[in-house]
Image (cartoon, helix red, strand yellow):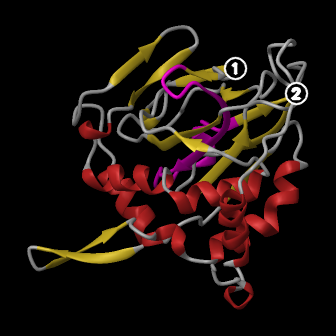
Amino acid sequence: MVSIEIDGRPRVTPLGTFDDPSYARLAIDNAARYQEADPFPHIVLDDFINVDLARSLSAAFPGPDEISWVVRDNENNRRRYQHNETKVPTLLREMLREMNGRQFVLFLETLTGIEGLLPDPYYIGGGVHLSGQGDFLKIHADFNWHHKLQAYRRVNALLYLSSDWQPEWKGAIEFWDRDMTQVKSSALPILNRLVVFSTSEYSNHGQREPNRCPPDTYRKVLNLYYYTTRRDDEDMSDPHFTLYKPQASEFAMQLGSDYRHSADPSSITPAS
């Protein structure tokens, strides 16, 4: 995060947030915990970004009447979202782009162990999400194919920006077991909390309990999804798809290696 001046006044910006080598260290230190989590790979990371930036993002979050929203109101899903970045406030647009940028993608690859992640510049199904009193999202497994990218959905990253969210207001994201018999893990949508999880045919999740927040309070979250052009795990929906591992280029591998070594700058090998 840096501050810039606009018309002679300082303004916080997300630009460069994930350049800090502490994020590489965070990913390395938590990779095993993420990949071994039950019922499927996931993690909850609190105090994820600079607190002043988190508060600024929360304050910039538009209310139900401040922008045009895509509204969902049916038996499975009741909430608002906007995946067109041109319709959201500049600060949120900047944060979305930062989370679609190289440094955050490398953070996710290191954390999840999934190489070759692609961000979604279209924010299909993602972007800025807002839900209020009584809103919910039933337990589900996400769509797995991005028709524009021609790629498989692999990872979800959710940055919660709800100020002063109280436990009695419910609204937690829940992770259910494969057989849908019990909740194995959950996380409330508190300010500056990042939730990351791997998606598959069995990554059952959702916000089952409707929000019980006051009428003028909102559950705020940035939803970002990441893809790969391949699937090589046990949860592929197409049983005829060939299992294989990509032959990565030296350059591609060096990107990840340099990123992981950035947690200890003295260990980075200069490029030839």
- Residue at screen point 31% across, 77% down: 3
Mark 2 or mark 1: which is in front? 2
Q: Which residue is at the front of the view, 109 or 178?
A: 109
Q: Is residue 203 above or below residue 194?
A: above
Residue 83, image x, y percentages: 38, 32
Going by the picture, which residue comes out furthest to the top? 75
What type is the residue that disc 2 sits on?
Leu
Quadrant position of residue 230: top right
Residue 113, image x, y percentages: 79, 51
State left or right for residue 7 relative to residue 116: left
Going by the picture, which residue comes out furthest to the bottom? 266
Residue 170 covered by magenta stretch: yes
Label 1: element kind: strand
The segment highlighted magenta reads: 147-173
What type is the residue that disc 1 sits on?
His
Residue 128 image label: none
The residue where tag 1 is placed is 140
The residue where tag 2 is placed is 243
Label 2: element kind: loop
Dots 2 and 1: beta carbons under 8 Å?
no
Residue 139, image x, y percentages: 70, 21
Residue 259 covered by magenta stretch: no
Quick one: label 2 or label 1, which is nearer the N terminus? 1
